[in-house]
Amino acid sequence: MLNILLAVIRRDLLLAWRRRTDVFTTLVFFVIVASLFPLGVGPEANLLRTMAPGVLWVSALLATLLSVTRLFAADYADGTLEQMLLSTEPLPLIVLGKVSAYWLVTGLPLVLLAPLLGVQFDLPQGAIGVLSLSLALGTPALSLLGGIGAALTLGLRGGGVLLALLILPLYVPILIFGAGAVGADAAGLGAGAHLLLLGASFLSALAISPWATAAALRIAME
Amino acid sequence: MNSSVKAVSDKLSAAPGGINWFKYASPQTFYPLAGRLIPLFAWPALLLFAVGLYVSFFVAPTDATQGDSYRIIFIHVPAAWMSMIIYLAMAFWCALGMIFNTRLSFMMSQALAPTGAIWTFLALWTGALWGKPTWGAWWVWDARLTSELILLFLYLGYMALVAAMDDPRRADRAGAVVAIVGAINVPIIYFSVKWWNTLHQGASVSMTSAPKMASIMLMGMLIMALAAWAYSIAVVLVRVRAIMLERERNTDWVAQMLENRP
C-alpha cells in the first residue's frame, strides 16, 4: 500500500525535476500577482499591512488554480493515466500520491517564499510566522480540492476557466480561515481558532477528495 | 459494491405485491406522468401567486419601522428558501443517480439547476433592493448575502460543467460529483463566512433583530412560499420533459409518441 504511494510520489517528483521551469513559472506567477497589488492600491504601509494576508492568500490560491490543470494532463495525454486506472492498486491511493507530489512541487515552495513577500508588505514578525503556518496547513487542502476539479475538467475545451468556476467557490472556507488567521494574529486575538479550523478543512479534504478525484477520473476516462 | 446495489434494486423492483419503486424511473413512463402533473402544480401556482401578491400588497399593513420597503420579503424570503432547497434536491437526485444508475435522476438534477440559479439570483437582487432603503447600501458583506452569492457560483459551475461536455453520460456523472461535493461544502461555506464576518468586524446588520412579524405578514409570506414551491415543481417538470425528449429522441417510445400524435 505504502509502496505504491511512494512510487507515485517518486515518479512525479522525478518528472517535475526533469521539467524544472514548470515549477518556477508557478512560483514567479505567485510573486508577480502579489507584487501587482501595491502598484494598484498605492504604497501606503498601513494599507498594505492590513491587505497583506488576503493578497498573499488570494495569490497562492490563483497560483494553485493555474498549475493544478497540469496535475493529470500529461498522464492523460500519454496514456499513463489509463494504466493507472487499470492497475490493481487502489486508485484513490495513486491520486493521493500524485497530489502529494504536486503539493511538494508547487505548494511547498509557496509556503517557503511567502515570508519574503510578507516582509515586502511590512508584516510584523509574528504575523509572518502565522502566515507561513496557515499556508502550510492550507495549501495541501487547496491541492486536494484542486485535484477534483482537474479530474473533472480533464480534456475539456476551456477547461481552465471551467476549473476556476468549479473550484473557487470550494476554496472560500480555506481562504477565510487562512487569511483570517493572519488577520486575527495582527489584531491581537490569537490565530489558534483559525488555524485549528484550517487544519480541520485540510483533514476533511484529505478524507474526501482522493475518492472524489478517483471517481471523477473514472468518469473522465469512461 | 455495484453488484450489491443491483441486488437491492432487483429486490425492490421484484417485491411481490409491493410497489415498484422503479416504475417511474424510466423516461418512457415518467414522461406522461410528468405531463399529467404539470397542470396540478401550474394552476395552484398561478392562484397562490395571485392571492399571495394581493395579501402582500393590499392586506398586509405598512411596517412601523421599515415602511413599505419591507414588502420585498414576500418574494425575497421564498426565493432564498427555494434557492437552498433546490440545491439540496439537485444533490439528492445526483446521489440517487450515482447509486442506482438511473438516467432520469440526472435529468431531474439538470432540470432543477436553472430554476435554482434563478431563485438565487432573485434572492440576491431583491435583497439589494431591500438593503438600499433599509441598510443604506445595495450590498453588505453580510454572512447570508455572501453565502448566497457563493451558492449562485456553485449553480453556475454545475451548469457550465454539464454544458461543456458533449457526451451526456459523462456530463451526468461529472455534474453529480460537483453537486455532491458542493452540497457537502455548503454548510462549511456558510459557517466560515459567518465566522469571518463576526470575527472581523462584528455583524453591523442583522435580520434577526427585526421586530416580530405580524401574523398577516407571515401568512402572506407563507402563501408566496407555497406558490414558489408549486411554480418550481411545474417549471422543473416542463424542463425535464424537454430534456427527456432531447436525450431520447432516437428511441422507440419517442417515435411512437410522435406517431400517435394527431
Image (cartoon, rainbow, N blue to C red):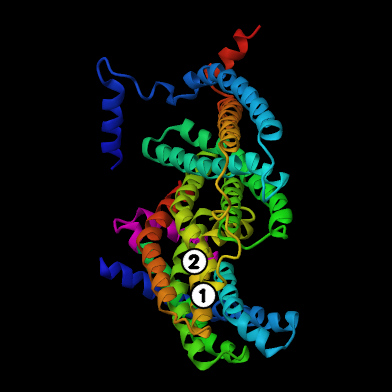
Quadrant location of the N terminus of chain B in the rendered image: top left
Q: What stretch of residues is rendered in magenta?
A: A68-93
Check if residue B31 falls in the magenta segment: no
Question: Is B36 displayed left or right of A35 in the figure?
Answer: left
Q: To which chain does the residue with label 1 belong? A: A
Check if residue A73 falls in the magenta segment: yes
Residue at 55% over, 69% down: B202
Q: Position of residue A197 (x, y in %)?
A: 41, 70
Residue furthest top as drawn: B262
Residue placed under numbered mark 1 in the picture: A180
Residue placed under numbered mark 2 in the picture: B195
Q: Position of residue B262 (x, y in %)?
A: 66, 6
Q: Quadrant of residue A58?
A: bottom right
**Label 1: element kind:** helix
**Dominant secondary structure, magenta:** helix
Q: How many marks?
A: 2
Residue furthest front as drawn: B64
Asked if residue A122 can be seen in this view, the reply is yes
- Residue A75 numbered tag: none
| Relative to A94, residue B7 above or below | above
Q: To which chain does the residue with label 2 belong? A: B
